[in-house]
């Protein structure tokens, strides 16, 4: 879950802090002078979808290794890019573009600083690039057996008196 850091959890000299939690979860604290709250709301909604449906799963061991330098394993690629407001869908502050092996998070201009994006991208090089988060597309794509649609009951129509 993403949070504005209002309690001083972020170490000095940093703009973001990841605290690993049991069960493959994490709390991510972001510097309040570099990120706006509406961006966090949308990031939380999208992340619940990605993690809840198993599209990305965490592969952490709670050793604090997220802050070690990236090893360059190239397991996956993920990054943030600031995009002019006119190029974003109306009312959308973040828009993920995902394909097998990568996810680029388009961020509406004015909702975080360039400095923050640079630090977030270093963190994502470590987390996604070194396989601390794993993308799971095993149930998608051509040739993959799709679930059969669930049979739905017929729609009810109001009774009309004649």
Image (tube, rainbow, N blue to C red):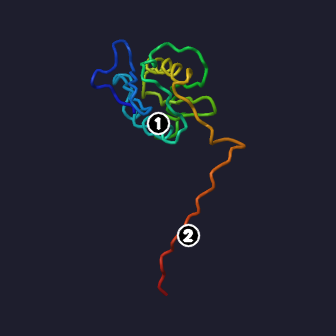
* Residue positioned 55% across, 24% down in the render: 131
| Circle count | 2
Residue 75: image location, x then y, percent: 60, 23
Q: Is residue 102 above or below residue 138?
A: above
Residue on which disc 2 sits: 154
Where is residue 136, by image quadrant? top right
Q: Position of residue 153 (x, y in %)?
A: 54, 67
Taking the spot 39% from the left edge, 35% from the top edge, the residue there is 38
From this view, report whether residue 96 is shown above or below residue 147.
above
Q: Nearer the viewer, residue 112 or 154?
A: 154
- The circle on residue 19 is none
| 142 vs 62, nearest the viewer | 62
Residue 104 location, x and y as percent?
56, 29
Q: In this picture, is 150 found above or below 13?
A: below
Q: Give whichever of discs 1 and 2 has the lower sequence position.
A: 1
Whether the residues at callouts 1 and 2 have beta carbons within 8 Å, the answer is no
The residue under the point 48% across, 41% down is: 52
Query: How packed is label 1: few (under 14 Cα within 10 Å), some, or many (20 or more)?
Result: some
Q: Which residue bears the numbered disc 1?
A: 47
Q: Quadrant of the N terminus?
A: top left
Relative to 153, residue 107 above or below: above
Query: Residue 30: horizontal and vertical position, in percent?
Result: 37, 24
Residue at disc 1, secondary structure: helix
Q: Secondary structure at mark 2?
A: loop
Q: Residue furthest left?
A: 7
Residue closer to the observer: 24 or 48: 24
């Amino acid at each position: 879950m993403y949070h504005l850091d209002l309690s001083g959890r972020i170490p000095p000299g940093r703009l973001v802090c990841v605290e690993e939690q049991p069960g493959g979860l994490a709390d991510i604290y972001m510097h309040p002078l570099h990120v706006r709250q509406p961006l966090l709301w949308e990031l939380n909604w999208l992340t619940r979808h990605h993690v809840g449906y198993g599209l990305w799963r965490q592969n952490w061991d709670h050793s604090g290794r997220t802050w070690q330098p990236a090893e360059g394993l190239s397991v996956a690629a993920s990054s943030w890019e600031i995009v002019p407001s006119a190029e974003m869908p109306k009312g959308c502050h973040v828009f993920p573009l995902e394909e097998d092996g990568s996810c680029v998070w388009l961020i509406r201009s004015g909702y975080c600083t360039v400095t923050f994006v640079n630090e977030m991208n270093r963190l994502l090089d470590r987390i996604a690039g070194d396989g601390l988060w794993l993308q799971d597309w095993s149930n998608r794509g051509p040739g993959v057996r799709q679930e059969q649609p669930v049979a739905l009951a017929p729609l009810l129509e109001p009774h009309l008196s004649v």
